[in-house]
Image: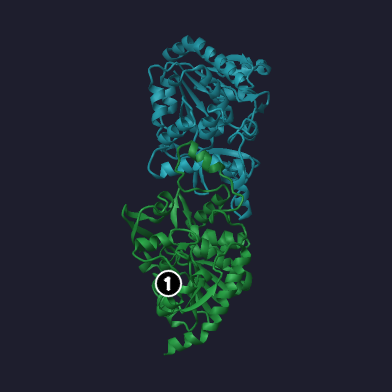
Chain colours: A green, B cyan
Amino acid sequence: MILALAGGVGGARLANGLARLCPPDDLVVAVNTGDDFRHLGLRISPDLDTVMYTLAGRGNTRTGWGLEGETWRFMDALARIGGEIWFRLGDQDLATHIERTRRLKEGQTLSTVTAALCRAFGVAHQIVPMSDAPVQTIVHTDAGRLAFQDYFVRRRCEPAVRALEYAGAESAAPSPGLRAAMSDPRLRAILICPSNPYLSIDPILALPGVRAMIAARKVPVVAVSPIIGDAAVKGPAAKIMRELGHAPSAATIARLYSGLADGLVIDERDRHLRGEIKAAGLRVCIADALMRSPRDQARLARTTLEFASKLEPARHQRVTA
Amino acid sequence: MILALAGGVGGARLANGLARLCPPDDLVVAVNTGDDFRHLGLRISPDLDTVMYTLAGRGNTRTGWGLEGETWRFMDALARIGGEIWFRLGDQDLATHIERTRRLKEGQTLSTVTAALCRAFGVAHQIVPMSDAPVQTIVHTDAGRLAFQDYFVRRRCEPAVRALEYAGAESAAPSPGLRAAMSDPRLRAILICPSNPYLSIDPILALPGVRAMIAARKVPVVAVSPIIGDAAVKGPAAKIMRELGHAPSAATIARLYSGLADGLVIDERDRHLRGEIKAAGLRVCIADALMRSPRDQARLARTTLEFASKLEPARHQRVTA
């Protein structure tokens, strides 16, 4: 059984590759909910939806969010009556938010609602929120303290990031699905998807007990670098790295996950960083890390799983050393 | 200045005719909100929307509710994920409900929200809710006590009506707009639109002080019959009349409004009911009461206004007698 920690686009892509290789019972994708917010009275979980839509084969591969073949009649009508339109909600996507909000208001947990939505979308693999309790990623920037979507969507990641805060994380229990996966005797590896480390992975790691549980498990922990060359495949990861004083590179990713991960999958063009990554204590796997198609996703997932299985002895050694 | 009491379709049509004749400052349409309800987390005001959309020239004239040229992508997506779809919400219509709900949650009154939506839809005439406080029309039927939309939409008016209840009406103050209109020295006439008397007009009349204020004003009160022959132009008015033990006819309308209205506008084919209507204490105006087009609406509105102006002396006499 494999546990993958994921955020939005990059996480969804690797998770989709894993889903093509693993039987439904053998994969749990634990997804960041630090980006979740209330908008227009609706509870929106952008990363959960991106992973769910991608695994359902319904994701918009061009934008990286929302549904394929989406229409915008609601949004256009809202614009005409002067409503808030900075966060775009497609006509079909809206149904997901309405149904999630309705179920949450009924008292269902986010885990239960996510499972129901996944069933409705025909997703057989387990997608679980990192927590059922609210966690809010707050971005401290040169333009002040910004709620995540304010920073990410409304201001298009333009303000320079000074620090990240995961409000509520200290008291947000990992979700039952994440806890079950972390303590499952069948667990073979923990994968950190090529998601933004600051915005997608760190919120998960900030939950009480998660780092300790990962450290305690004698299974390999493998990350896939979201940085190729000096750029992020998608999103502001490289920009934020720079703003926080780090050179954007797979080596920086290695240092961020040092002590947590046993290995890092990097792209071929980052082969020269092997030494730096090893110096951070991680083993290196070189692959074609750019996922353009579902086929690429499955290929990278396979490479990552094979790398993880090779690391098993090393992990045992390290833990028992 | 004219005050029109209105429900959904029939009310919207006469109100639209009046809007073509009266300058914006000279018409207030007070609309039933007993049908309002919460659905999918949204605050829905069906009659207010029907009147607003109709006066904006955007109403769906075929269905009598919703917007013209509407699409159903949201609804189809909601159906696919197993959401509640018995109450149909179009993609564009949804924007109205989302914006209304958002503003109400901010603490705005329904009157303020309605005014803002009307501005956004380019409606210059004043459309006001009957009250800013919640009133719920409850339909007592042979299938039990039903919330209005449950009776009206979900069960398609099939259960036989035994009685009507307007829960909350006894303590729901008339809205500022309705009160201002009723006490406006410029008020020339009060019109009761051809709406369902039980479901649309009675909830307005059930608000504290409304009947007394209407009686106290020395202006003619004229109703337009929603029944032509033995049928309602639209909706369950005739069916409910029968279930409550009355023969559906304009004469029954006259008896329902006896003591409140001074005159009734009826269709040509109901000419033979003149004696019965006069016996109920109402003067009669015979017209083509079927409104198929905006032109019909303006024509009937003009006839009704002229009839009201002729009734002025009679009203003075009656009130001072």
The crowd level at tag 1 (other Cα within 10 Å; few <14, some 14-19, many 20+) is: many
User: Where does the image place residue A134, in percent across and percent down from the top left?
Assistant: 41, 62
User: Picture quarter containing residue B14?
Assistant: top right
Q: Position of residue A290 (x, y in %)?
A: 55, 65
Using the image, determine if residue B309 lies above or below residue A3.
above
Q: Residue B58 appears at what percent x and percent y? A: 57, 30
Q: Residue at x 41, y 13 (%)?
A: B320
- Give the camera-side residue of B45 and A7: A7
Q: Is residue A167 left or right of residue A220?
A: left
Extreme-front residue of the structure: A272
Amino acid type of the residue tagged 1 in the rendering: Ala
Kindly identify the residue that appears in the image at 43 percent across and 78 percent down.
A275
Left or right: where B248 falls relative to A6: right
B256 versus A119 height, above or below: above
Identify residue for label 1: A251
Which quadrant holds the N terminus of chain A? bottom right
Q: Position of residue B277 (x, y in %)?
A: 59, 18
A135 or B278, which is in the foreground?
Answer: A135
Q: Residue drawn at (39%, 61%), measured in percent from left and top?
A: A240
Quarter occupied by the C terminus of chain A: bottom left
